[in-house]
Amino acid sequence: DVKVTQSSRYLVKRTGEKVFLECVQDMDHENMFWYRQDPGLGLRLIYFSYDVKMKEKGDIPEGYSVSREKKERFSLILESASTNQTSMYLCASSSPPGPEQFFGPGTRLTVL
Amino acid sequence: GENVEQHPSTLSVQEGDSAVIKCTYSDSASNYFPWYKQELGKRPQLIIDIRSNVGEKKDQRIAVTLNKTAKHFSLHITETQPEDSAVYFCAARRTISGSARQLTFGSGTQLTVLP
């Protein structure tokens, strides 16, 4: 059974803080993804990675960066958190050629 | 890039009735169309998917249809039950680079099944 875990379920940060969201998968998946979920906007892709140390911008990368130093771990970094980054953040992984993405439980981030 | 539109945003049905959710996509190169269900407070989970070489797929009470010409696909749930209440997301997939494949999601439909 695929397991995708995220470091925190809830996180509260102050404007300007540097924020790290961690995602770990235990199925040796090549692809990993970070989405943010907002009401009425669905899931929007921030960044994805198809291999260690490889990263690609998604649809809304502004204000975010990522790091993938190990295959099982994909980190999302908010260099200087802002209130408009308050959202639910979901991590997912997949392994080609299988198309299914497996999601983590999500991190609800509030930036005050 | 791909754009996926999903309708309706909310849907209420009586238990036992059918529910239909519709999505349209813009990129004719998209070739895979999954549907995810997200129950309250839980992670999205794949419930059914369809590839572009198939027009319809069924799994018990759930079916998905695809019209490539019109670039739209739909989720059909028959004999709805209270446990079907959730947010449903459609998505379309296209190849970006190498083996990387990006899903573009619709905005979601909150389905409520009334007892």
Image (spheres, helix red, strand yellow):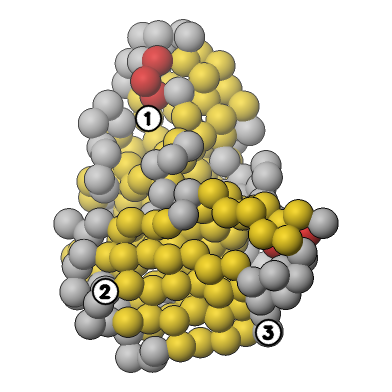
Position of residue B85 measured from the top left corner of the image (x, y, whole percent):
69, 55
Amino acid type at circle 3 is Gln
Residue A4 appears in the picture as rendered? no
Q: Answer with left or right where residue A78 lies relative to residue B94.
A: right
Q: Residues within 10 Å of mark 1 (few under 14, many from 20)?
A: some
Asked which secondary structure carries label 2, the reply is: loop
Question: In the rendered image, which residue does mark 2 sit on?
Answer: B71
Label 1 marks a residue whose chain is A
Specify whether disc 3 shares its chain with disc 2: yes
Q: Residue at x 57, y 41 (%)?
A: A106
For marks 3 and 2, the one nearer the N-term is 3
**Count of labels in the image:** 3
Asked where in the image residue A52 lies, by quadrant, the reply is bottom left
Residue B54 appears in the picture as rendered? yes
Amino acid type at circle 2 is Lys
What separation in Å lies between label 3 and label 2 (alpha carbons)?
A: 25 Å
Position of residue B95 measured from the top left corner of the image (x, y, whole percent):
24, 69
Q: Are marks 1 and 3 in contact (CB under 8 Å)?
A: no
Asked which secondary structure carries label 1, the reply is: strand
Position of residue A71 measured from the top left corner of the image (x, y, whole percent):
43, 55
Label 3 marks a residue whose chain is B
Position of residue B9 measured from the top left corner of the image (x, y, whole percent):
48, 49
Asked which secondary structure carries label 3, the reply is: loop
Q: Answer with left or right where residue A59 lies relative to residue B109.
A: left
Question: In the rendered image, which residue does mark 1 sit on?
Answer: A77
Label 2 marks a residue whose chain is B
What separation in Å lies between label 1 and label 3 (alpha carbons)?
A: 42 Å
Which mark is drawn over residue B60? 3
Mark 1 vs mark 3, foreground winner is 3
Q: Residue at x 35, y 61 (%)?
A: B103
Relative depth, front residue between A92 and B103: B103
